[in-house]
Amino acid sequence: MASILIVDDTEAEQTRLSRLISVGDKYNIHTSASGDEAFTLVTKECIDLVITELRTPKLDGLDLLERLQDEFPRIPVIVIAGHGSEELTVKAIQQGAAGYLKKGSSVKRLRSMVEKLLAGRATDLAHSALLRRRELDEYEFKLPSRRVLMSATAGFLRQRIQASEICPDKELLRLGIALEESLLNACLHGNLELDSALREHDGDLFESLADERSVLSPWKDRHVYVNASVTQERAQITVRDEGVGFDPASLPDPTDPENLLKPHGRGVMIMKLFMDEVIWNASGNEVTMVKNAVEATES
């Protein structure tokens, strides 16, 4: 059973989040009221996921995140941001938060993020020893527009990059998130032509339209093409969809406090934050991402 640590300085919020997440005793839930207490607990217990309030009078979630990234970089951290915490949320993402949620986000979104991050961690732990034996990888994929395949491909490529040891473990989670965002963008916004604005409420319209278009022409006939090359010096991944494309420059700045917690442009922001190079083709339906080895970046 996976173990989740909830960090908040109020017992009421600890209880609320615990009840929202652990339906039918699905997870082993730990709680903590301070960053120091939470960090100590992580050193003693086998924690698979941390969910922390970003900032309260008695808790500095950024400080906890930084400490966890230094000592336990493979444990994903979700930060919960209250109103007015937009700039702190940007810092949390830059420091390695695996996900962020606006306080009061839907239960569906919370549970979905928890399940996705725990699944990724379980896969990483299961395959890390084997992957370290690989020295060179080149892959080509032609994927139907199914979200489960996008997530699986991102996880697969992250594991292959982990084997090359081109970046520290604490960057692997962020790199995987960037890969998944690029693939989901190609699938949902490129091939299925879904507008991010449809996600701004409970997301039901977005989900229903995604399900509908996934079985109707022309959307269902489109594919996502992936080319990946991983060496000891760099990883280069190109993702192409068969949609009409877009102009990346036309997106609103997602780091602007007014836009940060909106879904529009979130994927592009994450890709730019976590990759060394992000380049689109002229039509906007193909993106190439590069992650250089740490030595190559610093030289």
Image (cartoon, rainbow, N blue to C red):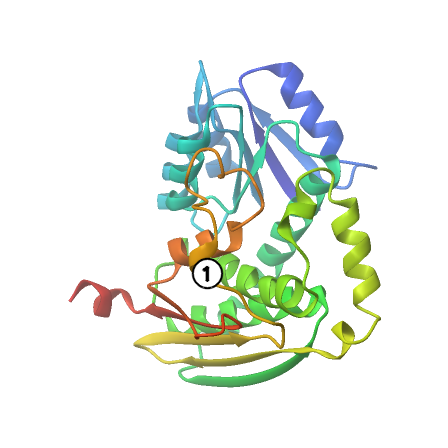
Which amino acid lies under the numbered mark 1 shown in the image of this protein?
Pro
Residue 126 seen anywhere in this rendered image of the structure: no
Q: Return the residue at label 1.
A: 248
Q: How many marks?
A: 1
Q: Is residue 164 above or below residue 278?
A: below
Q: Quadrant of residue 162?
A: bottom left
- As rendered, which of 65 and 145 lies closer to the eye? 145
In the picture, measured across the screen, residue 14 lies left or right of residue 294, that is right
| Residue 195 percent across, percent down from the top left | 65, 54
Q: Residues within 10 Å of mark 1 (few under 14, many from 20)?
A: some
- As rendered, which of 266 and 107 lies closer to the eye? 266
In the picture, measured across the screen, residue 80 lies left or right of residue 172, that is right
Q: Residue at x 77, y 41 (%)?
A: 26
Q: Residue at x 64, y 20 (%)?
A: 13
| Residue 224 percent across, percent down from the top left | 62, 76
- Secondary structure under badge 1? helix
Q: Quadrant of residue 276?
A: bottom left
Q: Residue at x 38, y 45 (%)?
A: 94
Residue 257 seen anywhere in this rendered image of the structure: yes
Query: Please, which residue is most extreme toward the left here?
Result: 299
| Residue 122 percent across, percent down from the top left | 62, 57
| Residue 184 percent across, percent down from the top left | 61, 62
Q: Is residue 169 above or below residue 137?
A: above
- As rendered, which of 176 and 42 lies closer to the eye? 176
Q: Is residue 35 above or below residue 212?
A: above
- As rendered, which of 179 and 207 lies closer to the eye? 207
Point out the image quarter for the C terminus.
bottom left
Q: Residue at x 63, y 62 (%)?
A: 189
In the picture, measured across the screen, residue 299 lies left or right of residue 51, that is left
Q: Is residue 198 above or below residue 291?
A: above
